[in-house]
Image (cartoon, rainbow, N blue to C red):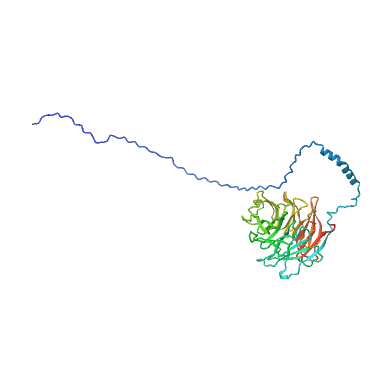
Amino acid sequence: MFKDENLESINIKSDTLSEKYVRDQSCQTKPIELKNQYSQAILRLSVDVQTELSHTPASVTRLRVDNSKKLETFMLTVYPLVSEQLTANVRSHAFDDYELDELNISENIECKVTLTCPEQKEEDKLDITCLSWNSIGSIVASALGKFEHDTWCTHPAQIHIWNVNKQENSTPNKTIDADNCVTAIAFHPSDPPILVSGDFSGKIHVWDLSKEDNILVAFSGKETETHHEAVNQLVWIPSTGSVLNFISTGSDGNIFLWMYNKLKQHLGLISTFQLSSDVIPRNVRKSSMRSGTALGITCASLTSNQNKDILVGTENGGVFCCKEKTNGGGYTIIAFGSHEATVNSIDSSQAMKTFFLTCSLDMCIHVYQESQSTPLHKVDPMSGYLFAVQWSPTKHVFYVSTAASNILVYQIEDDEVHLKNTINVGNKKVCINSLAVNKEDKIASADSNTTIKIWEFKND
């Protein structure tokens, strides 16, 4: 029933996967390290560089070698005549008794003319704020206004025109009415009838005194920018022709360059520049000054080279030279030794090139040279407040007006300043508010009684 049976083997493949080998591996980055580092400058250092003005040495002219005999022939021709004349001059006695007294100014100044402004009501009384000579030296213009204002200026001011050569000087030859106080006037240096004025509101007016009517020929503010505060100084730039240029400065710190066209009777503004704390050298900038603070300009004068470079004095006692940049883009500011109070007047000398002087409410006079930042001389006249300084156009002499009724006459001699004369203007104690000196060295002074006096040297 059962029996042994050998059957063929059967292979059944396993569904189990092949053996896998497992190995443990790990990966770990280095710890991230954090560090805080600080950099702080402990010391602060501010360095300024101010160059001094220097004169460029004259260039050496290289002349062409001339081997011709023309020069020798000429010299041999004129030598006998020149030699004879020089010998005659040596033997001449024409100047034996002549003494040079040009600088003898001790006791030779006298009052030639007295001009009295028309009477004014006490409550409306005005002061003479400025004087100016015309180019001929026969006409004096006086500006009337008030030095102090509490509010807006509503004073009915005037400009008086005087002919000092007339016998009768009780009334002005011409009176110009102004809307408010006239603070600055200036005749053109070569065009006698042209007069420019500035007022307390900042407006500029140009007058032509040769006209019978409509003498106001141009004014600012209509089509051009103008000053926002009082105009304190007007300075003409010497020129001829129909186009005239002048500079105005004001309490707003602005320096404006103007152009007046006589043919078109048009006043145009060429350029503007503001003297502020940002443009002056850091070594004269006071710590209390805020950035952009305007420096009120109280007085101005052209430098001795008579170009557009201008010297200015400021309300805080600063004295600066504003040198026009070569590209015409404003001014480079050079600082000089300052006063302790407001600078009232500044003037440059034509007889002593590169010299200028200032006077201030600190009662001192400073004499400067344009190439040196510190004053050459400091003079304390011991005469109270000083209001105006003016150089003589021909002598090494300058004049100073005081609050003690005097005009002081100083002479620079042997590099020293000497007081040569004291002119007593009046018996009463009056302030000499303004001075003006013309090309003939005639001095016009105006006092607080609105009296103008013309002074001359006797030997002139």
For the image, the number of numbered tags is: 0
Quadrant occupied by the C terminus: bottom right
**In this view, which residue lies farthest toward the front?**
263
Provide residue 265's location: percent of width, then percent of height: 68, 59
Front residue of this view, candidates 63 and 50:
63
Q: Is residue 367 visible?
A: no
Provide residue 442's location: percent of width, then percent of height: 80, 58
Among the 4 quarters of the image, the one containing residue 76: top right
Among the 4 quarters of the image, the one containing residue 155: bottom right
Question: Is 437 placed left or right of 268 in the picture?
Answer: right
Q: Is residue 268 visible?
A: yes
Provide residue 276's location: percent of width, then percent of height: 64, 55
Quadrant occupied by the N terminus: top left
Provide residue 263's location: percent of width, then percent of height: 69, 58
Among the 4 quarters of the image, the one containing residue 389: bottom right
**In this view, which residue lies farthest toward the left?**
1
Front residue of this view, candidates 1 and 100:
100
Q: Residue at x 36, y 37 (%)?
A: 25
Q: Is residue 26 above or below residue 339?
A: above
Front residue of this view, candidates 234 and 83:
83
